[in-house]
Structures are given as structure tokens and as C-alpha cells.
Image (cartoon, rainbow, N blue to C red):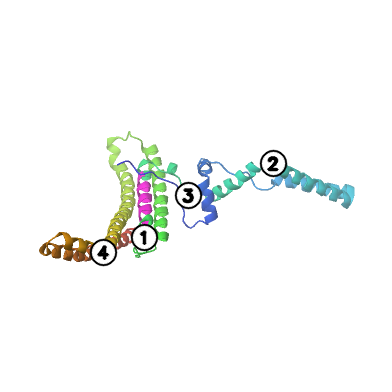
Amino acid sequence: MPAPEVSLALDPSLPETVTRILRANPHILIEVRRGRAPAPPGIARPVLACVGVIGLALLIVAGPLGLVAFLGMICGGSVLYFAMSDPKERAYQRRLRVVFDHADRFVLPEDLDETCGALLGRAQRAVLTVLGSTVNREGLLDTFDNAITLPDQEWQLARRLMGLSKLRTEHHKVVGDDVPEEFADAFRPYDAALETATASVTARVEALERYAEQAHNADRYYHARRKLGILQERTHEYEQLLAETAHDDTAVPQIERMSGNAQAVEQVFRHSIDEARKAANHLLAVDAA
């Protein structure tokens, strides 16, 4: 099975307006992550200082009227400069400022190494599976509020995986592949720390996947139950068909099975919902640990 595709992870507590800007400008997110910063807002301090000095000199030499004329020229020049500047560049700078101010509230696929990227992709696929399931939309998975809890789970995982990727990359740069055998024991605790952290976050991803699998199974049973309900509404037609085409000793057991099977399917469906809720509880237990 190919590795699941990983996508942008966002802090779910962000305002919707900020979230829309971040999602709509992936190229700016990459630029900011590579070190791009927005232009300084307003007029630079040296320019303000120069204007102040000139204004004070005019006040002394030319009096209040000269100062007023000078300030009028500055205002007019500012308006002209703003009118002549590129509106696309201004819009870009506004978006860049938003992204720059929230650079710690998103995780890009490029922020993760191969192992961590695969883990986040698995977690995101599990979250989408649960949130997109019919049983979730129908409110049957009521152990906790999936619409709030699952995006938060995804974000927590993304932050941890980003930190793990960064540390692992730095670790490999420092250690490399040429460690003397005599020093192997000294390096082993650092390697073990990375392995322990990876195992911990993997356990959380696997808990999410178990929850998603149970939600998927519950969906299958839900749709099967719905289909059976449609058939049950037409049971009399099937009973009439059997009565007309089969002997009574054959038709009666078949009719009885029609009624009994519906009850069995309902029990299987209810059991699948219970299993999904248990998986959700386990997910919370892993998160708390």
C-alpha cells in the first residue's frame, strides 16, 4: 500500500479568516518557512526622524505657515506614493504578514522527514475517515465531540512530528554514519530517545487508525441495516411470492428467517457502535499518557 499523502496541518483554534488565508496561499507558507519576511510596516524611523528635523527647522526659519506647507507636501506625497504603488504587491504583503505572524500555527509536509510525514498522513486519513463517516454525521459516535477533538489530535501530532523530524535531522547531521565502535554505547541513549519518541507518536497514530477502522465498519453495518429496513417494508410482497410459488412447509421457515435476520443485523450494528466508542476511549487514554 502506498504511503498516504500528507497535507497542510493547521492549529484548529485559528480564526476562520486566518485559516482561509493560510490554506489559499501555500506558496507563501513555503516562502515564510524558508525565511521570507514581510516589508516593515509604515514609514521607517530614519525617515520620520528626518521629517521631524526638517519640520523643526522650517518652524524656526519660516514660521507656522512654512511648517504647514511642508506637512501638506508630505501628506500629498504620501497619498501619491500609495496611489502609484502596485495593488498586487500590497495585497501580497498583507497575506505575507498574516502567514509570518502565524508561522508557528501550521506544519507543512516539507517540515517533516519521510517517517514523520508518513505518520502524519496516516493520522490525517484516519481523521477524515471518522469525520466523513455516516455514523459520525448521525451522531452515533457520541463518546466525544469528533469535530473538535479529532482536528486537535491531528494538530498535536503534527507539532510533535515536526519537532521529532527537526531533532532527528540535526541528530544525523551531528552523528553521521561513522561512529567508532568504542563510542557506540555512549551514543546509544540518544538513539534510544529518538526511537522512544517515534514509538510513542506511532502509538497515537495507530489508536486513531483503530478508531477510524471501527467507524468504517460501523458505517458498513449502518448501510446494510438501512437496506434491510427497505426490504422489511416490502416483506409482505416476498411472503406473497413464496406463498404462490412454494409449498407451505418451505415458505414458513423462510418467512420466519426474514423476521429473525433483521434482529440479528441490528445487534451486529449496535455492537459495531460500541466497539467504535471503545476505540475512541482508548484514543483518549493514549493522549492522556
In this rendering, which labeled residue sits more in front, label 2 or label 4? 4
* Residue marked by disc 4: 232
Task: Give the residue type at disc 4.
Answer: Gln
Q: Residue at x 36, y 60 (%)?
A: 136
Q: Nearer the viewer, residue 205 or 47?
A: 205
Question: Disc 1 residue type?
Answer: Asn
- Main SS of the magenta part reads helix
Residue linked to disc 3: 106
| Badge 4 element | helix
Of the two numbered discs 2 and 3 on the same chain, state the one appearing first in sequence: 2
Q: Note whether 268 is above or below 32 in the view shown.
A: below
Q: Helix, strand, or loop for circle 3?
A: strand
Q: Judge whether 168 appears above or below 10 on screen.
A: above
Mark 4, other Cα within 10 Å: few <14 / some 14–19 / many ≥20? some
Upstream in the sequence, badge 3 or badge 4? 3
Give the residue furthest to the top.
178
Q: Along the polypeptide, which appears first: circle 3 or circle 1? A: 3
Residue range corresponding to the magenta coloring: 118-130
According to the image, label 1 marks what residue? 136
